[in-house]
């Protein structure tokens, strides 16, 4: 490895560790639930490799336990993961003109967490696609490992040690703070918080994430446009 | 379930996960995006992060009802202030974990 490659790897790893820390207990918990639902460890491994999507995997395990059909589980996965359309679109702003092979590989690892970390880094500048890809794949490796561990030995691990269940919430809070780079961002964030909570309480299902964030971004965009015009 | 049952299920789920992530990236990264779209997308991260966090802090997932004063919310306030002050991602993660851990012991 050249010095540059080592540097890239180090930067990627430095950005990925909070995600990995947060993924480990969640992956363990998923493995435990999957094992209880009757999935063998190799099926858990297969799922984490083929479907790198935490919340969809939890829902899948619950649906298998409840005896749901394969098409119903696949359709639910699709609906739950639609929010990634927004995330990939936002990432595309920073990956303009990159070759499609790289993008096809990169897309595999776009999760809520890797999106939030990479987009924040891209926006701050001094971040490249290779560092971003390393973040994606480190997070993915830890996730696969954690879910397999959960399926094999998860029931022997004590729950909630050292507040590790709060790792991802803490990470999201900090990444949200990094996004607040002007009044319009603060207004949009507050709108999204209010709308998503109301939406979550009033409308069953998972549409609240996509629905509230698109509505808040649209209102924020219109407000900004109007403010600009009035000046 | 047999191996081929799992393969079919996870294959379908894999596509349903991969396509929403890949298609926008493959399409938009090779297209000149209009300025209004770039402006709109610049507000998506803050909106989506807020929409991911707020319901988990303000509601009870089991009953899907409003819940004010959960430990998650109480810990979120000092964690937010800490991150505003330090701008450190790693530090904020550890601070949040520490507070949540201690809070869990006090709260029970």
Image (tube, rainbow, N blue to C red):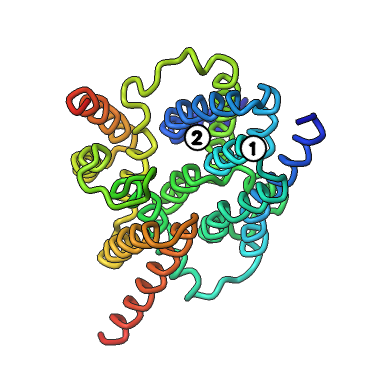
Residue A38 pos. (x, y %): 65, 25
> For mark 1, what is the residue?
A64
Residue B5 pos. (x, y %): 78, 36
Residue A175, numbered circle: none
**On what subunit does the disc labeled 1 rest?**
A
> Which quadrant would residue A150 be assigned to in this image?
top right
Residue closest to the eye, A112 or B107: B107
Who's the residue at 57% across and 71% down the image?
Answer: B33
* Image: A121 above or below B105: below
> Which quadrant would residue B86 be assigned to in this image?
top left
Discs 1, 2 touching: Cβ within 8 Å: no
* Image: B101 above or below A201: above
Q: Is residue A77 found left or right of A199 in the rendered image?
A: right
Q: Secondary structure at mark 2?
A: helix
Residue B21 pos. (x, y %): 62, 53
> For mark 2, what is the residue?
A12
Is residue A171 in view from this perspective? yes
């Amino acid at each position: 490895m050249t010095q540059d490659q080592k540097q890239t790897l180090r930067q990627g790893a430095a950005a990925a560790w909070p995600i990995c820390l947060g993924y480990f207990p969640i992956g363990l918990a998923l493995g435990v639930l999957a094992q209880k639902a009757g999935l063998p460890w190799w099926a858990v491994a297969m799922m984490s490799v083929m479907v790198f999507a935490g919340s969809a995997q939890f829902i899948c395990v619950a649906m298998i336990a409840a005896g749901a059909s394969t098409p119903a589980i696949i359709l639910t996965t699709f609906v739950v993961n639609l929010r990634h359309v927004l995330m990939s679109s936002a990432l595309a702003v920073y990956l303009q003109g990159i070759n499609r092979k790289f993008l096809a590989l990169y897309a595999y690892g776009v999760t809520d967490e890797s999106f939030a970390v990479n987009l924040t880094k891209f926006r701050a500048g001094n971040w490249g696609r290779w560092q971003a890809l390393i973040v994606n794949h480190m997070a993915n490796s830890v996730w696969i490992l954690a879910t397999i561990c959960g399926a094999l030995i998860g029931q022997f691990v004590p729950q909630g040690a050292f507040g590790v269940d709060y790792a991802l919430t803490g990470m999201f809070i900090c990444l949200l703070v990094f996004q607040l780079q002007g009044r319009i961002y603060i207004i949009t964030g507050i709108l999204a918080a209010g709308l998503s909570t109301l939406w979550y309480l009033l409308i069953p299902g998972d549409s609240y994430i996509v629905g509230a964030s698109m509505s808040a971004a649209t209102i924020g965009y219109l407000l900004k446009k109007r403010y600009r015009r009035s000046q | 379930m047999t191996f081929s049952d799992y393969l079919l299920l996870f294959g379908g789920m894999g596509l349903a996960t991969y396509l929403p992530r890949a298609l926008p990236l493959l399409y938009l990264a090779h297209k000149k995006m209009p300025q209004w779209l770039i402006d709109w997308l610049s507000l998506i991260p803050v909106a989506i992060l807020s929409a991911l966090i707020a319901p988990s802090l303000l509601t009870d997932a089991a009953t899907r009802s409003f819940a004010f004063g959960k430990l998650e919310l109480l810990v979120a306030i000092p964690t937010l202030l800490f991150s505003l002050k330090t701008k450190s991602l790693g530090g904020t993660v550890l601070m949040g974990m520490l507070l949540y851990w201690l809070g869990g012991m006090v709260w029970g």
